[in-house]
């Protein structure tokens, strides 16, 4: 390295232990694997939302509405 600081304290006076802890956290975060591709959107054939029951309707015709899709 050419002497360029990786971390620079701009405010306060951290102890040696605090600097060591910060260095460990920053180095661990820099070695993380790259993020995976976002999941593909769910298609109509595999969507589970249609399996959920809608709220029951109260009032006239409520029993008919509870029997199936409107």
Image (cartoon, rainbow, N blue to C red):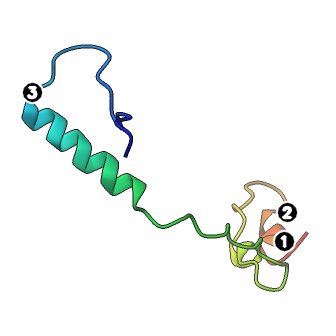
Considering only order in the chain, which callout, 3 or 1, is on the residue closer to the N terminus? 3
For label 1, the residue is 64
Residue with the mark numbered 3: 15
The 10 Å Cα crowd at callout 3, few under 14, some 14 to 19, many 20 or more, is few
Q: Is residue 60 above or below residue 65?
A: above
Q: CA distance from mark 2 to mark 3?
A: 72 Å
Disc 1 vs disc 2: Cβ atoms closer than 8 Å?
yes
The first of marks 2 and 3 along the sequence is 3
* The furthest residue to the front: 2
**Distance Cα–Cα, label 1 vs label 2:** 5 Å
Coordinates of residue 52 in the picture (x, y in percent):
68, 73
Residue lying at 9% horizontally and 33% vertically, measured from the top left? 16
In this view, the residue in front, 6 or 53, is 6
Of 4 and 48, the residue lying toward us: 4
Question: Which residue corresponds to the image point at 77% horizontal and 75% vertical from the top-left?
Answer: 42
Place residue 67 in its image quadrant. bottom right
Residue 15, given in percent of the width and then of the height, sits at 9, 27
What residue sits right under mark 2 in the picture? 61
Q: Residue placed farthest to the bottom in the image?
A: 45
Label 3 residue SS: loop
Q: Secondary structure at mark 1?
A: helix
Where 13 falls versus 42 (above or below)?
above
Q: In the drawing, does residue 19 fall left or right of residue 30?
A: left
């Amino acid at each position: 390295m050419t002497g360029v600081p990786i971390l620079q304290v701009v405010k306060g006076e951290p102890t040696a232990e605090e600097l060591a802890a910060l260095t460990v956290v920053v180095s661990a975060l820099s070695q993380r694997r790259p993020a995976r591709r976002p999941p593909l959107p769910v298609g109509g054939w595999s969507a589970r939302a249609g399996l959920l029951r809608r709220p029951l309707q109260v009032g006239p015709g409520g029993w008919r509405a509870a029997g199936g899709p409107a």
